[in-house]
Image (tube, helix red, strand yellow):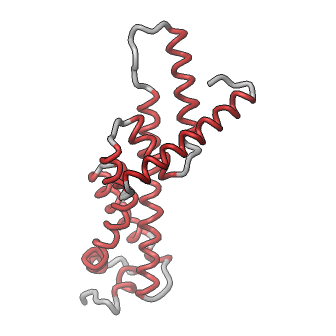
Amino acid sequence: MKSTSENFIRRLQKQKEDALEFIIDTYLPLIKGITHKVLSPLGNEGLVDECVNDIFLSIWDNADKFRGDPTDFRKWICAIAKYKSIDYYRKATKRMEVSSEHMDMNTEMSVEEELIQAEDKTELITLINQLEPLDRDIFLMKFFLGYKTADISRKTGLSITAIDNRVFRGKKKLLKEASNLNAGGYAL
């Protein structure tokens, strides 16, 4: 028996491989689109492919938990794709944060200066992480990864003006948060 649009859910729940092939053939563009939308600001196409594979593995592993019709199934796999992509995004940005903490900016600094700079950088990353996810991504791309505004515009789909406005508002927010830290007895 071969999977069709009428029986693929039952066959998937019985762990029939042809059902997974049917799902991949039918829903790959949708899943890849969702994943690409979430992960494209990172600029790593390999990460998108890895996430798509992980999404289909999750669908396979959790098929027995699904209850509903093909319309509900589409919503279910879209939710899996969205949340799995967000998880990948968070992991990737955490790696960027860790790697940016270990950047060597000036090799002629004293140990005290390096410690102060590392502490300042840690506090700055903490402040940036308080921004909205899109604003945080823009800040990371612009100030840590050195992207030009036009490149950020292409990656995020926002206009250059919108990006400049978000950077301006983000800087204002960071300054306000930094002054709150300083008022609390912390040095920035």
Nearest the camera: 130 or 162? 162
Looking at the image, is 66 positioned above or below residue 131?
below
Q: Relative to 171, is 17 on the left or the right?
A: left
Coordinates of residue 178 in the picture (x, y in percent): 64, 33
Coordinates of residue 181 in the picture (x, y in percent): 69, 31
Residue drawn at (39%, 84%) of the image: 9
Coordinates of residue 160 in the picture (x, y in percent): 37, 51
Residue drawn at (35%, 35%) of the image: 146
| Furthest-front residue in this view | 161
Residue drawn at (39%, 40%) of the image: 142
Which quadrant would the N terminus be assigned to in this image? bottom left
Looking at the image, is 109 positioned above or below residue 123?
above
Nearest the camera: 117 or 102? 117
Numbered label tally: 0
Residue drawn at (42%, 72%) of the image: 78
| Furthest-right residue in this view | 184
Q: Relative to 16, is 125 on the left or the right?
A: right
Looking at the image, is 148 positioned above or below residue 78?
above
Which quadrant would the C terminus be assigned to in this image? top right
Q: Quadrant of residue 6?
A: bottom left
Nearest the camera: 28 or 9? 28
| Furthest-bottom residue in this view | 6
Q: Quadrant of residue 71?
A: bottom left
Coordinates of residue 112 in the picture (x, y in percent): 55, 9
